[in-house]
């Protein structure tokens, strides 16, 4: 078990006020994904530096590096099991790996023919790991077996998927969206085209919602709120976000940025969006209002995560490759940040 920076430190000493706290010992390259444990305030962070780092977050926001393990290529996705004692990760080495918190051992548990873009834990039976790849498949793994228990062929490369059991929603290249009921995991319950005109970047399932549904974010600064059942389709809508005016005097919103991540609050069902424009917003889908806007930071926000109680919101400021190789300038910020959520920022508003 490799510990890094064993002393408990925070880089931002002004963390006592309303300022967000910068975590110590961030990865050495862009952050691709982050996920909090379902049992305690441990944060797993996957990076393009081939590593997964695990941090402990204290009550005052102080953080401590607890462990780190490696892939043989950039890590693209991380998640935890329900018990909070195992971390799963997928990467550009086509492998899914499992890190056991108690033993510090890493084992390969999944294999694809192309990079694994997403890993998610499915809380069914004894627990199943779902992996989605650019090889146009989703595979389901029972950790007791070295071969997948089932495999699904997708219409295109898997870009994103999310699970709120029994709902799983998959977004692929060419704007296909497949909705699964995981009691029947190999046959899509419904297949639709994305309600957004441009490439799908992220899909996140609703939490704390009476009716199942999901949010879709695209590269074109837009989010769609989509319900699964036709009876709820009157509540579907989309809205623009992560856009800027081309000049201070024009109100044209002509500069359009990708929506990089959408995170739903575990208790209130409100959600965050973050983008290549360096901003984060909190939203209430039912009241259709914006609850909070963060001050813009000097770099894209690559990914976000709420902890299990929803009182900590983590986000990564790091290059998201939205401008290709030319955007990777020296000295680009690469930071992990923690925000203490106030109730009024994340609580639903009464409907108008």
Image: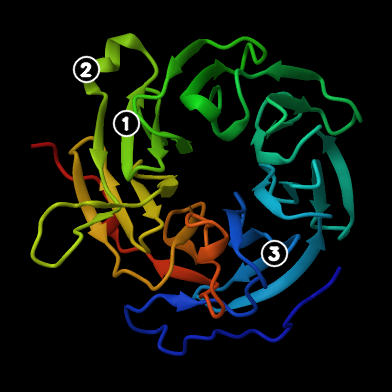
Q: Please tell me which residue lies in front, 92 or 305.
A: 92
68 vs 286: above or below: below
Residue 318 appears in the picture as rendered: no
Name the image quarter holding residue 297.
Answer: bottom left
Quarter of the image where the N terminus is located: bottom right
Question: What's the CA distance linking mark 1 and mark 3?
Answer: 32 Å
147 vs 332: above or below: above
Give the secondary structure at mark 1: strand
- Crowding near pointer 2: few (<14 within 10 Å), some, many (20+)? few
Of badges 1 and 3, the one in the foreground is 1
Give the secondary structure at mark 2: helix
Image coords of residue 235 (percent x, y): 23, 23
> Residue placed farthest to the front in the image?
326
Q: Residue at x 54, y 80 (%)?
A: 331
Quarter of the image where the C terminus is located: top left
Question: What's the CA distance linking mark 2 and mark 1?
Answer: 11 Å
Disc on res. 54: 3
Image coords of residue 248 (percent x, y): 13, 67
Q: Please tell me which residue lies in front, 295 or 196.
A: 196
Q: Residue at x 63, y 62 (%)?
A: 42
Of badges 3 and 2, the one in the foreground is 2
Residue 262 appears in the picture as rendered: yes
Q: Earlier in the sequence, mark 1 or mark 3?
A: 3
Q: Which residue is mark 2?
A: 234
Disc on res. 225: 1
């Amino acid at each position: 078990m490799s510990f890094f920076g064993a002393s408990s430190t925070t880089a931002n000493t002004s963390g006592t006020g309303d300022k967000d706290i910068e975590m110590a010992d961030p990865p050495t390259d862009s952050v691709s994904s982050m996920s909090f444990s379902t049992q305690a305030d441990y944060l797993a962070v996957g990076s393009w530096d081939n590593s997964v780092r695990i941090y402990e977050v204290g009550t005052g926001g102080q953080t401590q590096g607890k462990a780190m393990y490696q892939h043989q290529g950039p890590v693209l996705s991380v998640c935890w099991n329900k018990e909070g004692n195992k971390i799963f990760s997928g990467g550009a080495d086509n492998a899914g790996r499992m890190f056991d918190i108690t033993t510090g051992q890493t084992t390969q548990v999944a294999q694809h023919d192309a990079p694994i873009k997403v890993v998610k834990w499915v809380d069914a039976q004894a627990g199943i790991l779902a992996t989605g790849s650019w090889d146009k498949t989703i595979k389901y793994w029972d950790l007791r077996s070295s071969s997948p228990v089932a495999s699904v062929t997708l219409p295109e490369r898997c870009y994103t998927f999310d699970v709120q059991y029994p709902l799983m929603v998959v977004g692929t290249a060419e704007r296909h969206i497949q909705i699964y009921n995981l009691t029947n995991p190999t046959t899509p319950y419904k297949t639709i085209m994305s309600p957004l005109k441009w490439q799908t970047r992220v899909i996140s399932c609703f939490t704390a919602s009476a009716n199942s549904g999901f949010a879709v974010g695209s590269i074109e600064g837009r989010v769609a709120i989509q319900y699964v059942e036709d009876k709820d389709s009157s509540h579907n809508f989309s809205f623009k976000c992560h856009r800027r005016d081309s000049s201070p005097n024009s109100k044209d919103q002509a500069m359009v940025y990708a929506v990089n991540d959408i995170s739903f609050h575990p208790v209130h069902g409100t959600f965050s969006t973050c983008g290549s424009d360096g901003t984060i917003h909190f939203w209430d889908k039912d009241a259709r209002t914006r609850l909070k806007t963060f001050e813009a930071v000097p770099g894209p926000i690559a990914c976000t995560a709420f902890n299990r109680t929803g009182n900590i919101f983590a986000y990564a400021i790091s290059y998201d490759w939205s401008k290709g190789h030319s955007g990777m300038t020296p000295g680009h910020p690469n930071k992990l940040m923690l925000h203490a959520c106030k109730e009024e920022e994340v609580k639903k508003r009464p409907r108008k």
